[in-house]
Amino acid sequence: MASVSLRNICKSYGDIPITRGIDLEIEDGEFVVFVGPSGCGKSTLLRLIAGLEDITRGDLLIDGQRVNDKPPMERSVGMVFQSYALYPHMSVAQNMAFGLTLAKVGKAEIRRKVEEVSRILQLDALLERKPKDLSGGQRQRVAIGRTLVREPKVFLFDEPLSNLDAALRVQMRIEISRLHQRLQATMIYVTHDQVEAMTMADKIVVLNAGRIAQVGPPLELYHYPCDRFVAGFIGSPQMNFLPVRALRASAATVEVELPGGSSLCLPVDGSAVQAGDPLTLGIRPEHFVDAAQADFAFHGEIAVAERLGDHNLLYLSLEGVESLVNLRSDANGRVAVGQVYAAGLMANKCHLFRADGQACARHYREPALHG
C-alpha cells in the first residue's frame, strides 16, 4: 500500500477558494476520515487526491511520488462513490471485472481476482445477478469490490453509506472496518456523519471552511477538542455551551461565574485568560452527574424528554441561558415535562473556550487514553 502526503494543497474555482493550505500526512495502512459540515471542502479534497480535480497550488505525493500531473489511472487509487454507479445490464461479476477488462487484463486473471474479492465481500453467491436484484448493501459491496479487484495502493470512499437506511449503514460500517483490518490498506473516507468518523477512523481530519481544524485519533478529538467548532461537531448529541465570565485565572485553573451567579473552578490553562473575560463553558450531555456527587449542582425545568430505552435525553430550561441544556439520564428515572430536575457538573469533565473559540487546554487526562 502507500502513504499520502498533502503539502499546502489549495483549490480554487476562479476567485472562490475551496481548500486553503492543507498540510496532512497519511501513513501507510491508516484509515483516515475527513469529516465536517456541508461545504467544508472534504469531497473536493478527496477528488484532488483521486485526480478528478486539478490542484491549484501545492504538492500531492502518493508513496513518495509527486502525482499532481498524473491522470487518475496512473495514481494507483480506487474510488467508491456515494452513488453505486453500477451498470444495470451487467451481472455482479461483469461489473466487478469492468475496470480490469478495459485495462486488457487476461481473462483467467480477471476471473481469479473477481472470485477472490467476491469471497472477501461475501458476494460469491450473487455473481450472476443483476444490480436490480440486489439490496442496497449488496450493491454497495459490489461497488467496493469493483475497486478492490484493481488492487489500488489507496482506497478513497466518498460518503458511500449515505444512501443506505440506518440498519444497513451500521452493517456496512462494520464490513468496511473489517475489510480494512484484513487488507491493512490505506483508506481515506469522507463523511458528514461524525458517528461514522468516530467508529471507523484511526485518525480523523476535521475540516472547517476549507481548512483543517484538528487532526487526531477519535478519542483525542472527543476529549480534547482544540476549539469550539471541533467540540460542537464531534460527539452526539452535541456539546452544550453556556456563557460564563472569568473571575480569576492562572496557568493551572480558571474560576468562572456561571449563569445565575455561582462560581466553578476548572482545571484548565488560564494563561491567556484575564479576569472579566467572556468565556464559554462546554459540557457533553453524557457528562452530567447526580447532583449529590457533583462539584456544582443546578436545577432546571424539563422542556422535552426523549425516552430512548437504554437512557433518556432531557432538555432543560435554565435561568439565564437562552438555549435548552441537553443531558443524558438513567432510563429508569421517572421524568416528565415541566418537572424540576437536579443535575450536576464535574469540573474535570468541563471544557472552556475563549472568545476567539480556542480551547483552554485541560489539565485532566483521561485514564482510558493515558493510563
Image: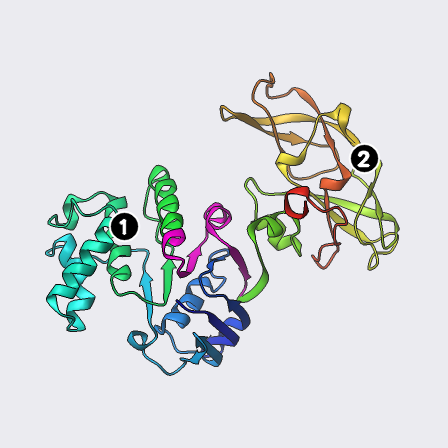
Taking the spot 62% from the left edge, 50% from the top edge, the residue there is: 231
The residue carrying mark 2 is 260
Q: Left or right of 143: which side holds 306?
A: right
The mark lying in front, picked from 2 and 1, is 1
Numbered label attached to residue 272: none
**Residue 152 location, x and y as percent?**
32, 67
Disc 1 residue type (three-letter):
Ile
Tell me, yes or no, whether the highlighted magenta stretch contains residue 136. Answer: no
In this view, the residue in front, 279 or 59, is 59
Residue 235 percent location from the top left of the image = 57, 44
Q: CA distance from mark 2 to mark 1?
A: 59 Å
Residue occupying image coordinates x 54% and y 71%? 22
Q: Earlier in the sequence, mark 2 or mark 1?
A: 1
- Residue 297 to residue 338: above or below: below
Judge by depth and name the residue closer to the eye, 10 or 167: 167
Asked which colour scheme the image uses, the reply is rainbow
When the figure is inspected, residue 300 is found, relative to residue 191, above or below; the finding is: above
**In this rendering, would 12 be left or right of 338?**
left
| Residue 192 included in the magenta stretch of the image | yes
Asked if residue 23 lies left or right of residue 247, the reply is: left
* Residue situated in front as seen by the camera: 278 or 309: 309
In the rendered image, is residue 309 in sight?
yes
Quadrant containing the N terminus is bottom left
Label 2: how many Cα within 10 Å (few below 14, some 14–19, many 20+): few
Measured from the top left, where is residue 275 in percent x and y?
88, 52
Residue ranking furthest to the top: 334
Seen in the picture, residue 306 relative to 112 is either above or below; the reply is above
Image quarter where the C terminus lies is top right
Highlighted magenta segment, given as a residue range: 180-209
* Callout 2 secondary element: loop
Disc 1 target residue: 120
